[in-house]
Image (spheres, rainbow, N blue to C red):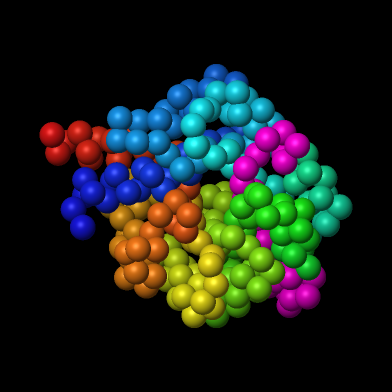
């Protein structure tokens, strides 16, 4: 696949993200203004919960509003989860990126980890996408990544996502491969999202090529494949412009 074709696909599958402590109304408004490009619109914008109403006001068309819960800590407090999800859904969020309670999972508490995601699924209902962030850099091993992926699939996740971008190790092709192979083997209608440290088309294309190879080219669309990034869009647009 040539870079211009890849860049156009990646823009359509991009969760344009700003999750910085320095975010304010001006930066989020600017983010939303970038969401519609000459090469098409991104799939979603992803912002902190407090900015969901502003994103709702600033966006038009079919661009989804994604936000984060249990972020980036990955705790296991069900009442806090319920409060956070209910609040952002009431504010107008379309998609919930929820951090998996990975520390509890690593410590062997599988049942409570599963219940946490099941509860998140119940709270999101059928109208709101649930993307579960595994924090693969903390899970570390392929076996743990695959086991966590299967648990989240069984618990009703719509997407399995690699990382928060807030830990030392974020998305890697190896972790993506483990997640995609598990989704493929499950035969379930579950998507994949790579995030954390993806800044250039060379970075992002690795995940696009991998998804095509494992899941097939017809699978890759915003319905099943997302890239979460902030600075990537500038590089993708530059790649497209260099072709003309």
Query: Which quarter shows the N terminus?
Result: bottom left
Give yes or no for residue 125 being in the magenta stretch.
no
Q: What residue is rendered at 46% in x and 75% in y?
A: 184
Residue 143 seen: yes
Residue 169's place in the image compared with 9, above or below, is below
Q: What residue is rendered at 21% in x and 45% in y?
A: 4
| Front position in the image: 117 or 197 | 117
Q: Give left or right: position of 65 versus 219.
A: right
Q: Give left or right: position of 110 versus 160.
A: right
Residue 103's place in the image compared with 204, above or below, is below
Q: What residue is rendered at 47% in x and 58% in y?
A: 224
| Front position in the image: 1 or 136 | 1
Magenta residues (range): 88-114
Query: Which quarter shows the C terminus?
Result: top left
Give yes or no for residue 110 being in the magenta stretch.
yes
Q: Position of residue 128 (x, y in %)?
A: 65, 49
* Farthest-out residue, top: 26
Residue 2's place in the image compared with 20, above or below, is below
Q: Position of residue 98 (x, y in %)?
A: 66, 53
| Front position in the image: 225 or 108 | 225
Q: Position of residue 154 (x, y in %)?
A: 66, 73
Residue 207's place in the image compared with 231, above or below, is below
Q: What residue is rendered at 74% in x and 76% in y?
A: 110
Q: Give left or right: position of 198 versus 72.
A: left
* Farthest-out residue, right: 79
| Front position in the image: 16 or 126 | 126
């Amino acid at each position: 696949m040539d870079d211009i074709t890849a860049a156009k696909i990646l823009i359509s599958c991009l969760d344009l993200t700003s999750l910085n402590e320095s975010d304010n109304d001006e930066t989020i408004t600017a983010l939303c203004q970038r969401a519609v490009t000459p090469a098409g619109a991104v799939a979603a914008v992803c912002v902190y919960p407090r900015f969901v109403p502003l994103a709702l006001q600033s966006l038009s068309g079919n661009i989804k509003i994604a936000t984060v819960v249990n972020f980036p800590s990955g705790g296991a407090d069900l009442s806090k989860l319920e409060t956070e999800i209910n609040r952002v859904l009431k504010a107008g969020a379309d998609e919930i990126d929820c951090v998996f309670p990975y520390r509890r999972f690593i410590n062997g508490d599988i049942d409570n980890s599963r219940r946490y995601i099941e509860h998140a699924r119940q709270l999101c209902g059928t109208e709101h996408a649930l993307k579960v962030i595994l924090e693969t850099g903390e899970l570390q091993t392929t076996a743990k990544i695959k086991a966590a992926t299967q648990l989240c699939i069984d618990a009703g996740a719509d997407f399995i996502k690699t990382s928060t971008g807030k830990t030392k190790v974020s998305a890697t092709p190896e972790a993506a491969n483990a997640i995609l192979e598990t989704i493929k083997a499950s035969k379930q209608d579950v998507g994949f999202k790579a995030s954390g440290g993806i800044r250039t088309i060379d970075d992002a294309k690795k995940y696009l090529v991998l998804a095509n190879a494992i899941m097939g080219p017809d699978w890759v669309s915003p319905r099943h494949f997302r890239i979460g990034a902030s600075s990537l869009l500038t590089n993708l647009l530059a790649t497209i412009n260099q072709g003309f």
